[in-house]
Amino acid sequence: MKFKWTWIATQLNTFIVATDMGGDEITIPMIEKHLNDSFKLAETNYKGWPQGLQSGLGVISILISSKMNEEAKEYCRKLKSGKKWAGFTIPVIYNSDKNEIYKFQKNPIWGRIYYPYFRKLISGLE
């Protein structure tokens, strides 16, 4: 949980949920299920101010595998995951064989003030 004045005086609760999929190929449906499950887990364990009242929830959802299809990589690069009420879900794929990470390339308009922080967290995991 972090509070920053530069975030327009908001509190952000951030969760990082990583799952090793072994050799299973990562697909878009797999990413979307992981995003939804991760967000539910984060909501269940959420602490702090009431969500939406100067308080948000960020979930970085990481899938780890040696195989993934191109559509899944693009999904992460384009940050096609949906917005949530006072929350964000950020899909990330880590290719364990090639030591490559696929994450958003541009900060979206919705929640723009938080994405440099998310990028820093993800980079710290690389």
Image (tube, grey):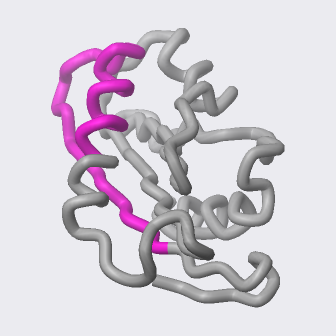
Q: Position of residue 27 (x, y in %)?
A: 36, 14
Residue 114 sits above or below residue 11 on the image = above
Given residues 93 and 3, the one toward you in this image is 3
Asked if the magenta segment contains residue 15, the reply would be yes
Q: Where is residue 104 shown, x and y percent of the image?
A: 66, 40
Q: Is residue 73 left or right of residue 79?
A: left
> Which residue: 20% across, 42% down?
20
Residue at screen point 39% across, 18% down = 68
Residue 8: percent from left, percent from top: 79, 78
Q: Is residue 9 above or below residue 92?
A: below
**Which residue is at 33% across, 20% downward?**
26
| Residue 17 image-quadrant placement | bottom left
Above or below, 68 against 116 in this view is above
Q: Position of residue 31 (x, y in %)?
A: 36, 26
Q: Which contiguous range is marked in magenta?
A: 13-38
Q: How many numbered callouts?
A: 0
User: In the rendered image, which quarter is residue 94 located in?
Assistant: top left
Asked whether, in this view, residue 17 is left or right of residue 76, the answer is: left
Q: Give yes or no for residue 28 being in the magenta stretch.
A: yes
Q: Is residue 82 left or right of residue 33?
A: right
State which quarter of the image contains the N terminus.
bottom left
Q: Nearer the viewer, residue 54 or 5?
A: 54
Front-lying residue, 24 or 16: 16
Q: Residue at x 46, y 43 (%)?
A: 99
